[in-house]
């Protein structure tokens, strides 16, 4: 793996392409091997090797953690069994009376976890609109949080939070900042370079990119934070499996190519969609009219491959649109949760990804029953536009 100087010297594609390559001293294997052993022998009495038991440490898992840290310009990464495990691991840094401020329009799984932890009195939670800078400054000053969780772009409305500003406000009151970077990946956004303390990923999404491995990662800016998180991961047993880590690193090697192509296609598709009848709104940060466009252009190196849209009319139109788009044997979109894989997906947040978020919380977040979220894959953009146009036409026949 590369040292700190090399992290800045080489590009992202080079860093991930070379991660762990030709590092096997035993046999000279160019591709790094997968270490599946649950335990590791000691040199002798009271002579521990770097690894002893796989829950606490594994060479394959550490290789992935180091590779992602290089991409994020962080110290190291803890690899977890899922994205939710990664979030819960970050929350282990909080104590009983600590306050966490989280986005009011966050992913419903995050919302559910935070509500459950608050109910158990592990810590306190306040949900707030982190895009409202003036109110956030007042809230931080009065509430004095211990941690602020940022999700940008938000899921599913793609709102943009100014990471640097929130980090600055958090530092003034002594709060740590954790950023969920799942929607953009390290290819398009580096929160640690904007001052964040922790970056969280569901590696299930763009990092793996093949929709065949569930996993997560927590990447720390400092050695001290990494060691605390690694201790908790071992203590609670949140670590990811070695073979899953092997597959995730294999998938991540093509991430720059995949994300670049998907982002390019999403831009073209978003432009197509906002010219179509039958749509009330298209949410895409690449539009200059998007409220967060200027911030996104400043803190991101691309606008991502997620698009959300609101279908005009009622449930009948929505159902017809989704059934036409995803229901045929040769459909180019699948009606499914998750995102960031090579395949294009359509999701209805109110009945799928955000179904467990109570209706009032969805209303406050602006997630309507007519909202559809699209994850753009690697299919030809023209083909995807044609499929979307056909589905819209059928919905209003």
Image (tube, rainbow, N blue to C red):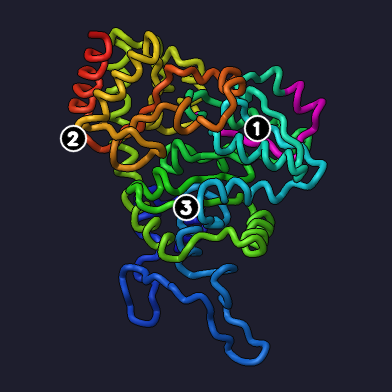
Residue 396 or 274: which is nearer the viewer? 396
**10 Å crowding of disc 3: few (<14), some (14-19), many (20+):** many
Mark 2 lies on residue? 329
User: CA gap, disc 3 to disc 1?
Assistant: 22 Å
* Helix, strand or loop at mark 1: strand
- Where is the N terminus found, in terms of image quarters? bottom left
Query: Residue 110: where, in percent of width, then height?
Result: 58, 38
Report whether 353 appears left or right of 130: left
The answer to whether residue 353 is left or right of residue 105 is left
Which residue is the site of mark 3?
215
Q: Nearer the viewer, mark 3 or mark 2?
A: 2
The stretch of residues the image draws in magenta is 137-153
Q: Residue furthest bottom?
A: 44
Q: Which residue is mark 1?
A: 102
Magenta stretch: residue 102 in it? no
In which image quadrant can residue 106 be found? Answer: top right
Q: Earlier in the sequence, mark 2 or mark 1?
A: 1
Residue 192 drawn at (x, y percent) = 57, 43
Label drawn at residue 370 = none
């Amino acid at each position: 793996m590369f040292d700190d100087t090399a992290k800045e010297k080489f590009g992202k594609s080079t860093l991930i392409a070379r991660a762990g390559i030709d590092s096997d001293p035993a046999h000279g294997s160019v591709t790094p091997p997968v270490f599946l052993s649950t335990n590791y022998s000691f040199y002798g009495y009271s002579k521990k090797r770097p690894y002893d038991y796989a829950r606490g440490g594994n060479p394959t898992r550490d290789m992935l953690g180091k590779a992602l840290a290089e991409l994020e310009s962080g110290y190291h990464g803890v690899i977890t069994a899922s994205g939710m495990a990664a979030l819960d691991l970050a929350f282990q840094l909080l104590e009983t009376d600590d306050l966490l401020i989280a986005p009011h329009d966050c992913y419903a799984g995050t919302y559910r976890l935070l509500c459950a932890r608050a109910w158990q009195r592990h810590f306190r939670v306040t949900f707030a609109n982190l895009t409202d800078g003036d109110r956030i400054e007042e809230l931080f000053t009065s509430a004095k949080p211990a941690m602020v969780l940022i999700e940008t772009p938000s899921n599913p409305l793609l709102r943009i939070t100014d990471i640097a500003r929130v980090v600055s406000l958090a530092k003034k009151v002594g709060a740590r900042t954790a950023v969920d970077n799942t929607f953009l990946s390290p290819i398009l956004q580096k929160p640690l370079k904007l001052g964040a303390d922790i970056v969280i990923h569901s590696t299930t999404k763009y990092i793996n990119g093949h929709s065949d491995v569930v996993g997560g990662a927590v990447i720390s800016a400092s050695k001290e934070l990494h060691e605390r998180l690694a201790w908790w991961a071992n203590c609670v047993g949140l670590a990811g499996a070695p073979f899953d880590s092997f597959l995730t690193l294999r998938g991540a090697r093509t991430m720059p190519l995949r994300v670049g192509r998907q982002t390019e296609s999403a831009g073209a598709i978003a432009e197509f969609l906002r010219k179509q009848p039958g749509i009330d709104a298209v949410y895409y940060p690449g539009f200059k009219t998007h409220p967060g466009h200027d911030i996104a252009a400043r803190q991101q190196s691309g606008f991502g491959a997620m698009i959300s849209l609101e279908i005009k009319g009622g449930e009948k139109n929505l159902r017809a649109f989704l059934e036409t788009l995803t229901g045929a044997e040769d459909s180019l979109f699948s009606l499914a949760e998750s995102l960031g894989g090579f395949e294009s997906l359509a999701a209805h947040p109110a009945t799928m990804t955000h179904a467990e978020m109570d209706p009032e919380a969805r209303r406050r977040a602006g997630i309507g029953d007519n909202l559809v979220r699209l994850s753009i894959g690697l299919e030809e953009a023209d083909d995807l536009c044609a499929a979307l146009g056909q589905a819209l036409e059928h919905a209003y026949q």
